[in-house]
Every structure is written in structure tokens, then in C-alpha cells.
Image (cartoon, rainbow, N blue to C red):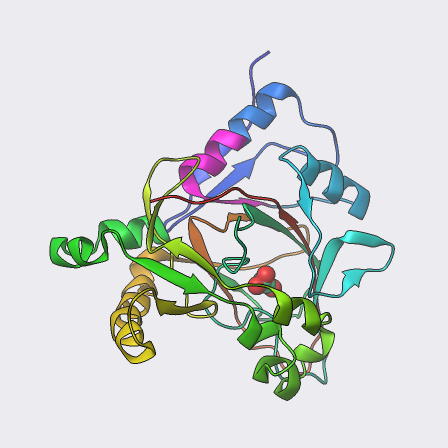
């Protein structure tokens, strides 16, 4: 059987998948077309979907094992689904800065499937940056400098008991399990990885969780990292996704960064996120 799935590349990173109903089980042909698009683009979007939490879980399980989030409040009755919620009286949001989820894990999560549940009338877009394109566009001297380097990633300063994000932001009130963050050993990943699905070279550092370059002081590390962050956040590597009712985004954490814009104060935004287990990363 042929697939009738359509794949429309975005102007920036990512592709929109059409002619599919995620509330129904996918045929092997349709699934394989979507999987290829995910490997090629590292970021795929679906529009006009109406799926229940059970169907969200069933779609996620088609890709692999679900990573049950240690720090986020789960959706009532669905421990597999993390709730990304901002209430009208909250000032800070979850994910309001460039980051990639779970880089603080030894085997960082493969990706997340985010379903819009309640949207503000305006605002609340999510930006995604393409870390393969960002790496490719580095000059040869910088690429040579990054070769063989490794970076330390940590969750303690974000999710731990002493973290400012937890204690000083109202988004932090929705986090739990500070002890788990404090107990988690920091991990080391290559600064440039080879993507496990696409084989592309990826710049794998991020402003939220990368704390140091192995063998460098904090100051030297930041001197190297800050220009890389500024480089990778340029518009030419970024897609800004405007959520509508029925929208779903599925990003690869190893291939992209994301940033949830916090420009809808006084309104509620509720999203359901399922994160999928990943694998060890190598240069
Ligand atoms: C996240 O960082 O996972 C949240 C993304 C979003 O709410 O758009």
C-alpha cells in the first residue's frame, strides 16, 4: 500500500505533515513516511488534529518508550504526559529560553510530542532552532576548535532545591522532585555529536543545561559558548511555530533547540508533552 502522507518543508527548519489523522492507528507505510520526515528535518508539525490523551500516548508509543518526566507535574490520570501550563496570574513560563530537553541525562531523550490543549487568543508561539544548520554554518576555524571537545550538562541549577528557577519563578512552583535533580550526576557529551538518525553533525550545547567545557574554567567555557549561542539563535536557523487548536509539534532534542515565548500574560496556555527515551550520543 502506498502512503498518501504529504510532507511540506517549512521556510526555516521543520516540515509540516499532512493528510494524516493521528487519532487513528497509523499504517506501517504512513508511519515509515513520517519517521523518514522526522529523521530528515528533526522537527515535524501536524495541524487540525483531535486526539485524546490515550491517542497521544498510543502515537508516542509507536516511536519507542516514553520517558516519564521526573520534574514536571503530570496530567491528572496520565503519568506519561507532562503538563506545560501557564495560568493567567503567572508571570514566568516553562521553557522560556533556548534549551534542549534532557541534555542533563546520560542518554538524552530523543524528542517530545507537544499537543496544544488550551491556547491564549494571541501569542504563545514556540521557536525552534536547527542545530545541524547552525553547525554547518560555523567557519572552519571554529569547527576545528570544537573538534574533540566535551561539555558538562547539569539539571541542578534549573530543577534542584537551590535553583532560582524553582524558588524565584512562579513557573517553578509547578516543578517537583528537587531531590532527584540534586541527586542526578552531571553528565558529559561531545560538543559536536553525530546525529543518531540523520548522521548529520550537530552543535550539542545549550544555554539552559550546559555548564562548562571539560578542561576549561567556567569563564573560559562561557567565552567559547556564548558566541556559539548567539550564532545558533540567528533567524536563519529558526522557525517560529504559531499554535492553533489541533496543532502538534514533534521535535528531536538532539537536532533542535526550542524556546516557548512568554508574551500572553493574563491568559492561560496548557500543553500536553510526551517525551521519548533516547540513546547515548557520540561525536
Ligand atoms: C517546553 O520547553 O517543552 C515547552 C514548549 C512550549 O510550551 O511551547
Q: As displayed, is residue 82 above or below residue 50? A: below
Q: Residue at x 75, y 37 (%)?
A: 58
Could you tell me which quadrant the C terminus lies in?
top left
Reply yes or no: does residue 69 show up in magenta: no
Residue 54 appears in which quarter of the rendering? top right
Picture coordinates of residue 242 (x, y %)?
A: 54, 60
Residue 90 appears in which quarter of the rendering? bottom right
Q: Is residue 129 visible?
A: no
Q: Of residues 126 and 257, which is closer to you in this image?
A: 257
Q: Residue at x 39, y 49 (%)?
A: 13
Q: Is residue 142 visible?
A: yes
Residue 51 appears in which quarter of the rendering? top right
**Most extreme residue toward the bottom, as rendered?**
168
Count the numbered circles shown.
0
Q: As displayed, is residue 105 above or below residue 45? A: below
Magenta region: 35-46
Reply yes or no: does residue 40 show up in magenta: yes
Amino acid at each position: 500500500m502506498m502512503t498518501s502522507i504529504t510532507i511540506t518543508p517549512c521556510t526555516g527548519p521543520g516540515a509540516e505533515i499532512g493528510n494524516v489523522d493521528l487519532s487513528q492507528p497509523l499504517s506501517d507505510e504512513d508511519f515509515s513516511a513520517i519517521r523518514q520526515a522526522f529523521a530528515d528535518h528533526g522537527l515535524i508539525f501536524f495541524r487540525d488534529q483531535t486526539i485524546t490523551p490515550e491517542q497521544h500516548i498510543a502515537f508516542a508509543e509507536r516511536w519507542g518508550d516514553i520517558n516519564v518526566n521526573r520534574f514536571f507535574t503530570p496530567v491528572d490520570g496520565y503519568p506519561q504526559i507532562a503538563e506545560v501550563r501557564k495560568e493567567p496570574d503567572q508571570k514566568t513560563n516553562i521553557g522560556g529560553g533556548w534549551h534542549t530537553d534532557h541534555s542533563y541525562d546520560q542518554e538524552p531523550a530523543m524528542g517530545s510530542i507537544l499537543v496544544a490543549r488550551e491556547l491564549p487568543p494571541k501569542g504563545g508561539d514556540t521557536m525552534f532552532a536547527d542545530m545541524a544548520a547552525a553547525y554547518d554554518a560555523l567557519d572552519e576555524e571554529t569547527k576545528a576548535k570544537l573538534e574533540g571537545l566535551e561539555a558538562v550538562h547539569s539539571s541542578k541549577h534549573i530543577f534542584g532545591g537551590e535553583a532560582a528557577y524553582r524558588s524565584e519563578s512562579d513557573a517553578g512552583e509547578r516543578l517537583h522532585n528537587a531531590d532527584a535533580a540534586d541527586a542526578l550526576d552531571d553528565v558529559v557529551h561531545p560538543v559536536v555529536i553525530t546525529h543518531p538518525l540523520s548522521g548529520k553533525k550537530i552543535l550539542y550545547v545549550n544555554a539552559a543545561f550546559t555548564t562548562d567545557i571539560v578542561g576549561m574554567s567556567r569563564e573560559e567555557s562561557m567565552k567559547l559558548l556564548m558566541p556559539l549561542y548567539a550564532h545558533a539563535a540567528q533567524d536563519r536557523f529558526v522557525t517560529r511555530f504559531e499554535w492553533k487548536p489541533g496543532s502538534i509539534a514533534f521535535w528531536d532534542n538532539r537536532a533542535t533547540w526550542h524556546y516557548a515565548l512568554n508574551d500572553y500574560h493574563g491568559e492561560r496556555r496548557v500543553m500536553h508533552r510526551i517525551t521519548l527515551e533516547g540513546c547515548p550520543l557520540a561525536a
